[in-house]
Image (spheres, rainbow, N blue to C red):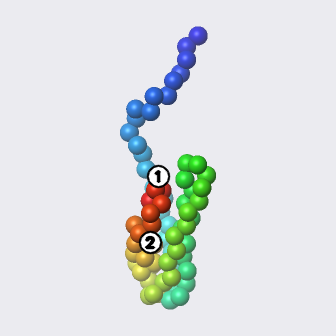
Amino acid sequence: MAWNVWIGGGPALSQEETYTPANVEIGDTFTLTFTDDFGDTVAVSFVATAATVANVCTGLVAACKASAHPVF
């Protein structure tokens, strides 16, 4: 009988998802919540300082980069 054994030699792959904020108003809070491989969740938030999609996207990217959680 043959046995399949995973040796983990393949390249690491990232998961990518696209989100677009809508109806942005100054003071709106936008939160991204991620779940890691162990089922733990971590969230990053940004409060819009301008009523633009670009403001929210830039703020959320900065919040992700500032996080010390390994999911980022």
In front: mark 2 or mark 1?
Answer: 2
Residue at position x 51%, y 24% in the image: 5
Please tell me which residue lies in front, 24 or 66.
66
> Can residue 23 be seen here?
no
The picture places residue 52, in percent across and down from the top left corner, at: 44, 83
Residue at position x 43%, y 50% in the image: 14
Per the image, label 1 sits on a secondary structure element best described as loop
Q: CA distance from mark 2 to mark 1?
A: 18 Å
Q: Residue furthest front?
A: 68
Residue behind mark 2 = 63
The picture places residue 60, in percent across and down from the top left corner, at: 45, 72
Please tell me which residue lies in front, 59 or 50.
59
Residue behind mark 1 = 15
Amino acid marked by disc 1: Gln
Classify 56 as above or below 16: below
Per the image, label 2 sits on a secondary structure element best described as helix
Residue at position x 53%, y 88% in the image: 27
In the rendered image, which quarter contains the N terminus? top right
Q: Quarter-wise, where is residue 34 in the image?
A: bottom right
Mark 2 surroundings: few (<14), some (14-19) or many (≥20) residues within 10 A = some
In the rendered image, which quarter contains the C terminus? bottom left
